[in-house]
């Protein structure tokens, strides 16, 4: 990917990009919501489609010159339908939060009650946090993980739903290292006459690869970002059934089916012109995810996570739920006497070339700005081609950093070792030296 024009026009931004390329090439990226897209995805994102305005949907736009945009959006929609087995897909959401916002607008009235997983137990900001639109405009009834097992107890989720009678139940995770029982969530929603919504942003790539159950067969609505384990551009999509089979009582006045409700919530309800360059890149990512190699990739993500988890635990590090079934792990620093030190540990790992994020653990007394956990995952390192032995090496390095987080020379030593380890797995060969 040549960047001569950028270098000439804006050397400061050019330099920052090159520095970022060097950072990712020489370090280990373990933030579980990040990944490395292909050059094809990046090329689609930096294409002339960034110039176009195309409010509306294929065949029904408000501006001229749409023949190529329509082709791109239809390709993205049809590929997503095939990939996830979805009846209806909207590929226009700018990102995960707007996608979820559109779903609330489509399904609920302001002030309506819904159920979502508590943020500190591994939920998401848009699932009812009091500082987010979802908690400000709607009424959250949270469900929590069990204090002992740190896992979801679906009998408790059912009891809450039966007592509270929410209009919508969201199943999702951002820091829960176990599988989500989508069928059970949907059965509960159906039994209490609530909409079932799944936000599969973190695990979409695992679902496509067949290593996690898909909710699309059962749920009314499924949202996902496209840039996490799915390895596409920043953005999101909303998938849904076409007809609302169970809840016409909630919107009998609109005469719209579920698909139409979602589409009109995205545009004109919430968004303006879609980002056509990103929709093009989503289409490319969906095509890549249909390849058999993507299944191997997803399987390896989970294998790598298990090996890393086992190695960390064998080195005396406590993981929330004592392991993982998916792509992520949550280190609980409290048993190591480091409760409330998540920020210091994240900084120490940065210095050692290992990127993670500080995160609350279930029932954490510490503040979210300096919580007691570290969240890590394997989608990005697996994209580089790393396997089990590298996961063991990285886990050992993490353990050394945790024990020596104040020792600057030890952190330097680990950084050099990490740089050596990753040098065999270039991400974008040649990118840092091209002009
Ligand atoms: N910020 C994302 C994550 O890191 O999980 C969720 O939106």
Image: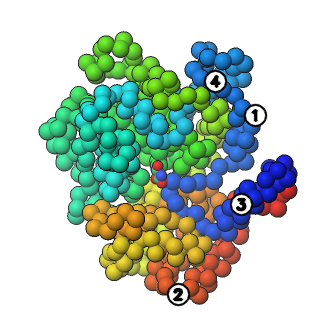
Determine which residue is flagged by label 4.
Answer: 54
Instruction: Place residue 249 in its image quadrant.
Output: top left
Q: Is residue 184 left or right of residue 355?
A: left
Q: Which mark is residue 296?
A: none
Determine which residue is flagged by label 1.
Answer: 48
Residue at 30% from the left image edge and 51% from the top image edge: 118
* Cα–Cα gap, marks 2 and 3: 29 Å
Is the image coloured rainbow, by chain, by secondary structure, or in one colour?
Answer: rainbow
Of marks 2 and 3, the one in the foreground: 3
Q: Label 2 neighbourhood size at 10 Å, few (<14), some (14-19), many (20+)?
A: few
Residue at 26% from the left image edge and 55% from the top image edge: 145
Instruction: Place residue 244 in its image quadrant.
Output: top left
Residue at 65% from the left image edge and 31% from the top image edge: 276
Judge by depth and name the residue closer to the eye, 430 or 206. Answer: 430
Q: Is residue 190 left or right of residue 262?
A: left
Q: Is residue 382 above or below residue 314?
A: above
> Closer to the N terminus: mark 1 or mark 3?
3
Residue at 40% from the left image edge and 32% from the top image edge: 103
> Closer to the N terminus: mark 2 or mark 1?
1
* Cα–Cα gap, marks 2 and 4: 55 Å
* Cα–Cα gap, marks 1 and 4: 13 Å
Is residue 426 at all visible to an observer of this figure? no
Determine which residue is flagged by label 3.
Answer: 16
Residue 120 x, y percent position in the rendering: 32, 57
Is residue 5 at all visible to an observer of this figure? yes
Residue 289 x, y percent position in the rendering: 60, 41
Q: Element type at marker 3?
A: helix
Determine which residue is flagged by label 2.
Answer: 407
Q: Element type at marker 1?
A: helix
Q: Element type at marker 2?
A: loop
Instruction: Place residue 243 in its image quadrant.
Output: top left
């Amino acid at each position: 990917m040549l960047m001569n024009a950028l270098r000439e026009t804006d050397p400061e931004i050019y330099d920052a990009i090159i520095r970022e390329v060097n950072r990712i090439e020489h370090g280990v990226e373990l933030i579980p919501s990040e990944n490395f897209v292909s050059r094809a995805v990046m090329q689609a994102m930096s294409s002339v489609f960034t110039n176009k305005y195309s409010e509306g949907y294929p065949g029904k736009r408000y501006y001229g010159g749409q023949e190529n945009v329509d082709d791109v959006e239809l390709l993205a929609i049809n590929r997503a339908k095939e990939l996830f087995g979805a009846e209806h897909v909207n590929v226009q959401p700018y990102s995960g939060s707007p996608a979820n916002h559109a779903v609330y607008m489509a399904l609920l009235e302001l002030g309506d009650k819904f159920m979502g997983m508590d943020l500190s137990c591994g939920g998401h900001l848009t699932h009812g946090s009091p500082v987010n639109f979802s908690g400000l405009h709607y009424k959250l009834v949270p469900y929590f993980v069990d204090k002992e097992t740190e896992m979801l107890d679906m009998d408790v989720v059912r009891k809450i739903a039966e007592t509270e009678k929410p209009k919508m139940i969201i199943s999702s995770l951002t820091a829960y290292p176990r599988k989500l029982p989508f069928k059970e969530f949907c059965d509960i929603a159906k039994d209490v006459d609530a909409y079932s919504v799944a936000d599969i942003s973190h695990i979409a790539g695992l679902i496509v690869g067949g290593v996690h159950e898909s909710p699309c067969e059962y749920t009314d609505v499924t949202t996902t970002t496209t840039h996490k384990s799915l390895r596409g551009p920043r953005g999101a999509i909303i998938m849904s059934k076409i007809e609302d089979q169970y809840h016409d009582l909630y919107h009998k006045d609109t005469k719209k089916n579920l698909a139409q409700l979602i589409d009109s919530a995205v545009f004109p309800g919430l968004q303006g012109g879609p980002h056509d360059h990103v929709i093009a890149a989503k289409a490319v990512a969906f095509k890549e995810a249909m390849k058999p190699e993507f299944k191997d990739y997803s399987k390896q993500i989970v294998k790598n996570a298990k090996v890393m988890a086992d190695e960390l635990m064998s080195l005396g590090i406590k993981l929330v739920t004592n392991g993982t079934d998916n792509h992520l792990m949550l280190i609980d620093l409290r048993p190591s006497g480091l409760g409330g030190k998540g920020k210091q540990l994240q900084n120490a790992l940065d210095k050692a070339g290992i990127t993670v994020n500080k995160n609350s653990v279930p029932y954490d007394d510490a503040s979210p700005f300096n919580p007691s956990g570290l969240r890590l995952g394997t989608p990005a390192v697996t994209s580089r081609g790393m396997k089990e032995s590298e996961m063991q090496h990285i886990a050992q390095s993490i353990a050394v950093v945790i024990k020596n987080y104040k020792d600057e020379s030890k952190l330097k030593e680990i950084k050099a070792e990490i740089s050596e380890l990753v040098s065999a797995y270039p991400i974008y060969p040649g990118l840092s030296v091209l002009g």
